[in-house]
Image (cartoon, helix red, strand yellow):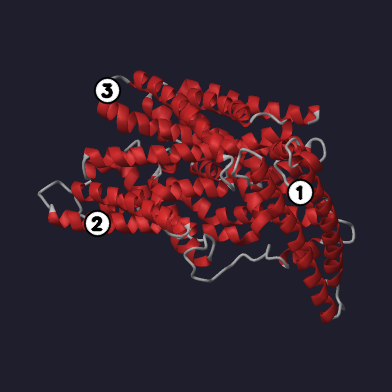
């Protein structure tokens, strides 16, 4: 990487860490450290919410998803706008009036201490693992650039993020997010411009996208009702609604964002910002992936994008087999390039329908040949190396950035990826520390300490969860598309947590026994569905919420007492 790119990245990292240190002077009190004294404007909170979502996983995993599968992943977000409207009318004013630090604090008021404790622990596990997946994304970038060991790159990224979060609390997180959001969007737009300019002079953007569409990259909607397919209109609308309700309504990393707002109305506005802009932003990210696919139709691409595994195969006894595959790949890639040029040309006005159909069929056949060679190469990697789980989806965008972009733009894109990762990791570490201290340490271990003590414990909790996430990251990087990994982690827990809050807010007759047993049954049901059926992970959110609600109501009816049910 050129020194100019290094200068851009280092300047950005220093700027963000300085923000955390500067704002640490305003966090001596617990409410200042965790909730910024409930003083932040709606637009800053809204940008923080969006920056927390638009993580490095989005830039690395979602662009890779767009490259391999096209626009279909956008259906994942179809339930989000409806969820934001529902939450802005229900949960947001409720939590603001309750004056709580965490969402789970309310559950003890409504039910009992055990329900609060178990729900908080489930949040800590789910968010801690998801945070690991977020840390894995920029670590993949560093490993591509430097060829470093993945564990070393994880620590290189994780340590400065942990440091500024420990120092500045939610103040640092939110205002760093505001800055990072502009860097992220700027990086995405720069990537789009670079990809368009990288197309051959005789291929227009429309023709390139039309060619990519021939193999399904532009298909954004699938109305089939197949519960084994994770990305359909119905899984996104229904399963995505439940996931979004749980994530934004019950996950402390998001609840804490809008609890920092000055008022209920400002908190509502911050959520509605995501309702308006989340889907367009995701389309932009996925389009970067589709444009990468179009770009590599006309430019040479590696057979596999994960160089560490390639090097291992080339040093093994199967090196000759791999070299033969590379020769075959070069041939079929050149054939696909010729077919892509022919199909792009066939989009011109006046081309006969029969000729256009023939060009399309030839391109589809050539693309299938390329994918077949890549599949055999992946199988060879799995067979010839100790690591039996090979997936290079997360390495497509880093490879494009480092090998095909000009000096200066490489630094900007990498800074954007770091910005996206740091904003999400910082928010998640801060929320993990909040739940650890408020729901566990202060509630069960030390009830009478002063704010200064709890702030110190919060910083140690941030360090603990940061190291835990770094540990998880070493595994998450090899589990496939990181955007899928993080949502699979969440979907295992989110539906059941949502079910507890549905009982708390919608059913006055529900009691603590029902909520607790319902929560356990919901987790067991999701575990069974996840391990013994082919049901797509988005539907696990529905399963968990429904089972917790139904079991909770039945158990409450059987064990009903005169418990207090008010909030």
Q: Is residue 128 above or below residue 192?
A: above
Counting from the top left corner in percent of width and height, residue 20 is at 54, 25
Q: Residue at x 62, y 26 (%)?
A: 152
Q: Is residue 518 above or below residue 345?
A: above
Q: Secondary structure at mark 2?
A: helix
- Which residue in the protein does label 2 denote? 551
Counting from the top left corner in percent of width and height, residue 403 is at 79, 40
Counting from the top left corner in percent of width and height, residue 417 is at 65, 39
Mark 3 to mark 2 CA distance (whole Å): 34 Å
Residue 59 in sight: no
Contact between labelled residues 2 and 1, with CB atoms less than 8 Å apart: no
Q: Residue at x 50, y 49 (%)?
A: 487
Residue 478 in sight: yes
- Which residue in the protein does label 3 denote? 446
Label 2: few (<14), some (14–19) or many (≥20) C-alpha neighbours in 10 Å: many
- Which residue in the protein does label 1 denote? 303
Tag nearer the camera, 1 or 3: 1
């Amino acid at each position: 990487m050129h020194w100019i790119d290094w200068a851009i990245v280092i300047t950005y990292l220093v700027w963000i860490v300085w923000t955390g240190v500067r704002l640490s002077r305003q966090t001596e009190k617990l409410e200042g450290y965790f909730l910024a004294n409930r003083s932040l404007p709606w637009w800053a909170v809204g940008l923080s919410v969006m920056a927390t979502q638009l993580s490095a996983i989005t830039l690395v995993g979602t662009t890779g998803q767009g490259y391999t599968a096209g626009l279909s992943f956008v259906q994942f977000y179809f339930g989000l706008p409806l969820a934001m409207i529902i939450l802005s009318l229900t949960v947001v004013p409720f939590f603001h009036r309750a004056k709580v630090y965490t969402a789970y604090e309310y559950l003890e008021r409504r039910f009992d201490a055990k329900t609060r404790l178990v729900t908080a622990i489930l949040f800590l596990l789910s968010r801690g693992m998801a945070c690991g997946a977020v840390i894995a994304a920029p670590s993949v970038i560093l490993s591509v650039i430097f060829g470093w060991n993945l564990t070393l790159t994880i620590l290189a990224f994780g340590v400065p993020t942990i440091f500024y979060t420990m120092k500045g609390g939610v103040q640092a997180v939110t205002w760093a997010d505001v800055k990072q959001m502009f860097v992220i969007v700027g990086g995405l737009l720069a990537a789009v411009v670079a990809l368009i300019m990288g197309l051959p002079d005789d291929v227009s953007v429309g023709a390139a996208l039309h060619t990519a569409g021939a193999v399904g990259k532009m298909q954004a909607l699938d109305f089939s009702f197949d519960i084994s397919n994770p990305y359909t209109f119905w899984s996104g609308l229904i399963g995505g609604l439940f996931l979004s309700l749980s994530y934004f309504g019950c996950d402390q990393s998001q609840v804490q964002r809008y609890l920092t707002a000055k008022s209920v109305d400002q908190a509502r506005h911050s959520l509605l910002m995501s309702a308006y802009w989340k889907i367009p932003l995701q389309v932009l990210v996925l389009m970067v992936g589709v444009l990468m696919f179009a770009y590599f139709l006309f430019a040479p691409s590696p057979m596999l994008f994960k160089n560490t595994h390639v090097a291992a195969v080339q040093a093994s006894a199967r090196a000759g087999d791999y070299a033969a595959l590379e020769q075959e790949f070069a041939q079929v890639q050149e054939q696909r390039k010729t077919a892509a040029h022919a199909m792009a040309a066939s989009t011109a006005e006046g081309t006969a329908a029969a000729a256009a159909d023939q060009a399309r069929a030839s391109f589809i056949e050539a693309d299938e040949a390329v994918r077949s060679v890549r599949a055999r190469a992946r199988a060879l990697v799995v067979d010839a190396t100790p690591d039996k789980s090979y997936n290079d989806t997360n390495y497509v965008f880093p490879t494009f950035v480092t090998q095909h972009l000009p000096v200066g733009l490489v630094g900007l894109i990498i800074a954007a990826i770091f910005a996206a990762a740091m904003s999400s990791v910082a928010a998640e570490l801060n929320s993990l520390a909040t739940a650890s201290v408020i729901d566990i340490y202060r509630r069960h271990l030390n009830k009478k300490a002063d704010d200064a003590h709890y702030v110190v414990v919060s910083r140690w909790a941030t360090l603990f969860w940061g190291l835990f996430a770094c540990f998880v990251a070493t595994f998450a990087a090899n589990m496939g598309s990181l955007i899928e990994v993080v949502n699979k982690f969440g979907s295992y827990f989110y539906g059941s947590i949502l079910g507890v809050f549905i009982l708390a807010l919608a059913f006055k007759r529900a009691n603590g026994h029902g909520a607790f047993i319902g929560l356990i049954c919901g987790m067991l049901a999701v575990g069974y569905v996840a391990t013994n059926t082919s049901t797509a992970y988005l539907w696990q959110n529905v399963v968990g919420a429904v089972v917790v609600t139904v079991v909770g109501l039945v158990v409450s009816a059987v064990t009903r007492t005169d418990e207090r049910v008010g909030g």
